[in-house]
Amino acid sequence: MIPKELLEEPKVVASYSDRVREVISKMQENNQWVVPVVRDKVVIGVISYNELLRRKVSPESKVINLMIPSNNVLESEDEARVVAKFYTTKSRALIVVDDKKRLVGIITREGFLSYYLNKGEIPDAKVREVMNSPVITIDANDSVARARWLMSNNHISKLPVLENKKLVGIVTTRDIVNRLYSEGGKKKSSILTEEERLMALPVREIMTYPVITTDGNQNVKQALETLLKRKISGMPVVEGDLIVGMFSGIDVVNLIAKKFELEMPIEAKLSGELKQGDVKAMIDGILERYLARLEKLTEVINFKVTFKEVAKSQDKKVYQVTARAVTKIGDFISKDSDWDPVTAVRKAVEKLEERVTRELKKIEEKGRKPKAEEG
């Protein structure tokens, strides 16, 4: 059974017929990143800040138009399963259900990390050993639209803001989403919509400053205490005037996962020149992020990617990528190609995610039909 200390009662629970504006207002008020969507007490999906950033819908739309499938955790499962779920999905919260998919509670990442911190079970390490590097940053004069694109494209929730190569602020998913939807009800005073005006603003107009930071020599436990105390999910790692990494709760989850000897179910067959340097790091990062997205949709048993050189012209190669996911709801395969191996793998796994999502929608529609006939 999941330890009771991990379970929380969600402050915000949405009905599939609720308006998006109402739910976002409650999310802001209660500082809740992930909201379960229920129908007749059964969990049918979730909405999150990350999804709100990726897919802009009218604030007056119903939640059912925005929610994504919820890959739940059963209350009967053990602690190791909870660790594995946080590790593979990189979620801000897990939805806990009973054997009939009725909502039992949620486990937030913050609650999960506090639980292990209080038990004294955070492995000893320096921030430098676990941080994410290199860091994706944005210039203070770049547009909010670019910040949104960088976050969505790289599946990250915060961007350090630089001016003359110095850290001057930070912008988060929540900074953008809260403004994006709070403006929705205003009358339009020009040709531009409120969204277009917001997207055209320089990032400096919405960034948060001063920025809470850490350094590479700090102990992970101390850095985690700062995250929990300040109610932030991550912070830049600064040495001198340089940002050398980003430290977040996910890095601590990865440390805990090592204690349980967990590994990502990823198999990537790279050709010789792709096994080295930044290209491999970028490919690995894309695969981990997309595995996390797939795990939020359904249980992934195996995730395999292979590369093949299919053409060559003027010393440039065309790479064909085949991505395959073996999941709880079936096997999925996609292919794509590009001169750039990183672009090729991104396009292939995006197709894979689209196919899994379509299959889940088909399953959901089939499940609704008998109920419609009964009524």
Image (cartoon, grey):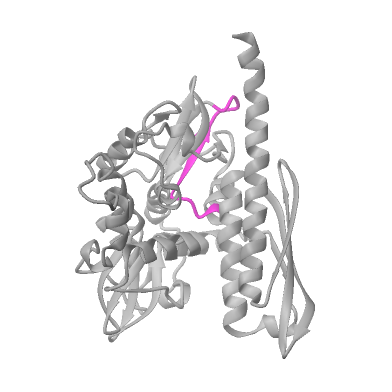
Magenta stretch in the rendered image: 89-101
Task: Report the quarter where the N terminus lies.
Answer: top right
Q: Residue 372 versus residue 43: which sits nearer the camera? A: 372
Side of 353 relative to 214 (left or right): right
Residue drawn at x 39%, y 31% as measured from the top left: 13
Side of 315 relative to 139 (left or right): right
* Residue at the extreme bottom of the image, as rendered: 315
Up-down relation of residue 214 to residue 39 (above or below): below
Answer whether residue 122 is visible to the viewer in this image: no
Residue drawn at x 56%, y 47% as measured from the top left: 296
Q: Position of residue 277 (x, y in %)?
A: 60, 85
Q: Residue 371 versus residue 134: which sits nearer the camera? A: 371
Task: Report the quarter where the C terminus lies.
Answer: top right
Side of 342 relative to 46 (left or right): right
Answer whether residue 26 is visible to the viewer in this image: yes
Up-down relation of residue 202 to residue 38 (above or below): below
Q: Could you say which quadrant of the image residue 159 lies in?
A: bottom left
Q: Residue 275 versus residue 131: which sits nearer the camera? A: 275
Number of numbered discs visible in the structure rendering: 0
Q: Position of residue 28 (x, y in %)?
A: 28, 43
* Residue at the extreme front of the image, as rendered: 191
Q: Could you say which quadrant of the image residue 125 lies in?
A: bottom left
- Specify whether residue 163 is painted magenta: no
Q: Position of residue 106 (x, y in %)?
A: 44, 38
- Specify whether residue 99 is painted magenta: yes
Q: Where is residue 110 in the image (x, y as percent from the top left)?
A: 38, 51
Up-down relation of residue 263 to residue 164 (above or below): above
Residue drawn at x 27%, y 73% as measured from the top left: 141
Q: Could you say which quadrant of the image residue 167 lies in?
A: bottom left
